[in-house]
Image (cartoon, grey):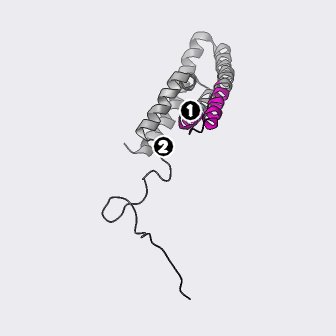
Amino acid sequence: MNPFSLLFFVFLAIPVLEIYLLIKVGAVFGALTTAMLVVATAIIGAWLLRLQGFSTWQRVQNSMNQGELPAIEMIEGLILLVSGALLLTPGFFTDAIGFCCLVPMLRRRIALSILEKGLLKGPNSGGGPRGPDGRGGSDTIEGEFRRDD
């Protein structure tokens, strides 16, 4: 499936699901209670996000002080960023995903999975142009240059 088709489907399906859930919950608990639940999940989520963010920041600082690369903690920070956006989006489905991302053990597993699968690649991770033989590299030839004037 084309990535843009998948994104289109996600951006179409999630709001429809959110509206459906809000209508169903509103029918059971009433409109005012549903609105209060949405606001309460946003407030609780923001508070938990703040706590988890500080905790992750302290682990980044400890790793850097020990001379280690805080790769897992940095990916956890990105997951927390996505979690915060999901928690501030009104709705119960996005809140559920956002709260799941706030669970430290689950977040660490997701971060390790991202690292193991190599889903995040930097500029020097071998994804550059391929040479004529298809093995990588480019038409650049390394050498030394000296000007004789």
Q: Mark 2: which secondary structure?
A: loop
In the image, residue 15 above or below residue 103: below
The C terminus sits in image quarter: bottom right
Q: Which span is picked out in magenta?
A: 52-79
Q: Quadrant of residue 34?
A: top right
Q: Residue 120, labelled with which disc?
A: 2
Going by the numbered disc 2, the residue's amino acid type is Leu
Going by the numbered disc 1, the residue's amino acid type is Glu
User: In terms of depth relative to the viewer, which is nearer, 3 or 111?
Assistant: 111
Q: Quadrant of residue 25?
A: top right
In the image, residue 104 above or below residue 2: above
Q: Which residue is mark 1?
A: 76
Q: For the point 53% across and 25% down, which residue is it?
A: 97
The N terminus sits in image quarter: top left
User: In terms of depth relative to the viewer, which is nearer, 31 or 8?
Assistant: 8
Give me the C-alpha separation between circle 1 and circle 2.
13 Å
Task: Find residue 116 and report its horizontal and vertical position in percent.
Answer: 42, 36
